[in-house]
């Protein structure tokens, strides 16, 4: 069992380079079977949950623009590669023909790969953030805590985006929480 998954959400976690993760209550390393009898899920847990979901929502909001920009970039690269024949027709007897061919193809490949790189980067961020949420959910499931979360984007003021995160809990000390975050644009 990975105790640190429980401890990173607990208010009693102590981290040090000498001892690693220890419990503030017992002054010992975590040692339990399935769940910690002394876990204290409070503000630290709430903040980690909110930030992880807010990060996921921000990534999801960029999906359409990421795919459109990637598609346009890839098409430009492909057009550069395929339209080399037009440039080659202008200088069919040029001694620089092969160098020009290699240059056009290289530029086209670089531009095309940049487009696909945007998609790969987007999917990596999405997968990693979802993994972070899955870890939190796995721990909460052991303690019987479930939740519903809503991230609501408010008005933009002076370049700052206001986002309200509302969470309704079941089987936790709080029934619901509302937090507003300011995100620099």
Image (tube, grey):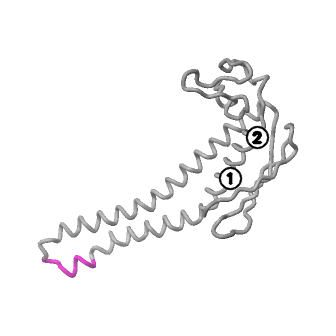
* Badge nearest the viewer, 1 or 2: 2
Name the residue at the bottom extreme: 90
Mark 1–mark 2 Cα distance, whole angstroms, equals 16 Å
Q: Nearer the viewer, residue 70 or 145?
A: 145
> Does the magenta-highlighted stretch encompass residue 158?
no
Q: Is the residue 148 above or below the residue 29 in the image?
A: below
> Does the magenta-highlighted stretch encompass residue 91?
yes
Residue under label 1, please give it: 54
At 62% from the left and 42% from the top, the residue drawn is 131
Q: Quadrant of the N terminus?
A: top right
Q: Is the residue 137 above or below the residue 55 in the image?
A: above
Q: Residues within 10 Å of mark 2 (few under 14, many from 20)?
A: few
Which quarter of the figure has residue 2?
A: top right
Element type at marker 2?
A: helix
Rendered location of residue 33, percent (x, y): 72, 19
At 67% from the left and 40% from the top, the residue drawn is 134
Rendered location of residue 103, percent (x, y): 25, 66
Q: Which mark is residue 75?
A: none
At 68% from the left and 21% from the top, the residue drawn is 30
Residue under label 2, please give it: 43
């Amino acid at each position: 069992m990975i105790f640190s998954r429980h401890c990173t959400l607990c208010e009693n976690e102590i981290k040090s380079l000498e001892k690693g993760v220890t419990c503030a209550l017992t002054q010992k390393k975590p040692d339990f079977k399935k769940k910690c009898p002394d876990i204290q899920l409070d503000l630290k847990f709430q903040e980690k949950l909110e930030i992880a979901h807010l990060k996921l929502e921000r990534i999801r909001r960029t999906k359409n623009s990421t795919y459109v920009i990637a598609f346009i970039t890839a098409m430009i690269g492909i057009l550069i590669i395929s339209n080399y024949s037009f440039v080659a027709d202008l200088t069919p007897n040029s001694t620089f023909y092969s160098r020009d061919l290699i240059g056009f193809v290289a530029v086209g490949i670089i531009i095309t790969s940049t487009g696909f790189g945007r998609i790969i980067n987007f999917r990596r961020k999405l997968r990693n953030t979802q993994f972070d949420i899955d870890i939190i959910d796995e721990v909460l499931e052991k303690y019987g805590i479930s939740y519903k979360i809503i991230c609501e984007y408010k008005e933009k003021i002076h370049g700052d985006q206001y986002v309200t995160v509302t969470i309704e809990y079941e089987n936790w000390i709080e029934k619901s929480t509302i937090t507003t975050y300011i995100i620099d644009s």
